[in-house]
Image: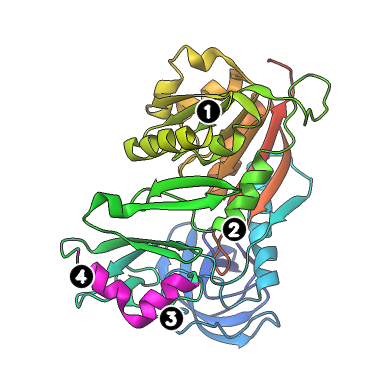
Amino acid sequence: MYVTGEKIVTGGKCIAHIDGKTVFISGLLPEETAEIKITKSRRDYDEAETVKILEKSPRRIVPPCPNAGVCGGCSLIMAESGYQQELRTGILRDLLERFKCHYDGVIEIIPSRPFEYRSRFQFHKTAGGKPGLCGKASNRVIPVNDCPVAVPEIREMLADGELEKKAALLPGKDRINVFAFAGKKSVESPVDTENLFTIVINNKKITFDIRSFFQSNIPAFEKAASTALSGFRFDNTGTDNSTSKGKTFLDFYSGCGVFSVMAENIFQKLFLVEENAMSIAAAEKNLGRNISGNKTDALFFRMKDREWTETEESKMEFDGAVIDPPRTGIGKKTLSWLFSAKIKNLRYLSCEPSTFARDTAELISNGWKLEKVFLCDFYPQTHHIETLGFFSRTEQKC
């Protein structure tokens, strides 16, 4: 069975059509002709894998990784880096169009180095105890001695056996958290204090537990966070009041408080909402360290997102807000709250473009305008996308 690839879609597969039926194909690039094998057949679509490429794209390269096509991590590693950015931008643009978000502006790219960018990993252990990653479309663990997207510190730990030795200290666990950055490295430990990691982001010290979520691409995240906290308008003139300080800032799904730490010199009062106890405890320490002696107050709300909507504070006016939800997107009750929330400047950072597009369509239908879109290119060699959206009211409600 032979097809010609059309475009890469969310999920990282290339689509083609056979007798009008859509086929999602792994390992294929647009405009390539290949022999394929159907692996799953559904009523409305099929899934397939590439057997042999007959006509290669001029932008296909030899993947610089021995595990390419075996490990499930880097779905676009066979494409030139510049072409990958085009493909990821196309995925995001298609989703915005599919959900009728009516955005025809430029999608700006916040770039990353193509390799040695990833600081955070969850390695699995093989039956023999070696560190590995899940195989392509499989739960089978593939042992790895190197990973080109990992920061140099992690590559060294893989090569010299240090990671395997430290993983052996956790015999009851088959998944091990690892974090490294700027010469420092940490492997999950049974001693809680040894799991704490401190980095400097935009001149601010941030401490977090490597067993909780933290961004993987620190240099790119620094750029994205600075962008998200820029250009706030605190009055109705439409101008950027860069010399004045906003009154209130809402940090929703705040994690360990990175956005609030960076916003403390922009706003007088910070409100952090986070469900995870480990993360909110870290946020309290990070804010205490960074705003000590400053005329900035921080209030912490350890609760589920839907519980926030029942608080008195949720009825306040906020000069700015950053909302950074998990892959599932903004919770339904929180999204409904946003329709009428008194927020002047809303920034939405998303790790899943399909839920970003879905939520954006709802926001647009309920009084918000999507002003800017940034593709935060945190994960080169993959189809994964972080998206940053700037929103303002189409009707002034604050």
Q: CA distance from mark 2 to mark 1?
A: 30 Å
x and y percentages locating residue 207 in the rendered image: 43, 46
The answer to which image quadrant residue 4 occupies is bottom right
The answer to which of 233 and 193 lies nearer the viewer is 193
- Dot 3 alpha-carbon crowd within 10 angstroms: few under 14, some 14 to 19, many 20 or more: many
Mark 2 lies on a secondary structure that is helix
- Magenta residues span 152-169
- Dot 4 alpha-carbon crowd within 10 angstroms: few under 14, some 14 to 19, many 20 or more: some
Mark 4 lies on a secondary structure that is loop
Label 4, on which residue? 168
The disc label shown at residue 67, or none: 3
| Rendered view: 272 above or below 203 | above
Amino acid carrying label 2: it is Pro
The residue positioned 61% from the left and 56% from the top of the image is 220
- Front position among marks 4 and 1: 4
Query: Principal SS element in the magenta part?
Result: helix
How many discs mark residues in the rendered view? Answer: 4
Amino acid carrying label 1: it is Leu
- Specify whether 172 is left or right of 261: left
x and y percentages locating residue 223 in the rendered image: 65, 51
Label 2, on which residue? 219
Residue 200 within the magenta-colored segment of the rendering: no
Q: CA distance from mark 4 to mark 2?
A: 31 Å
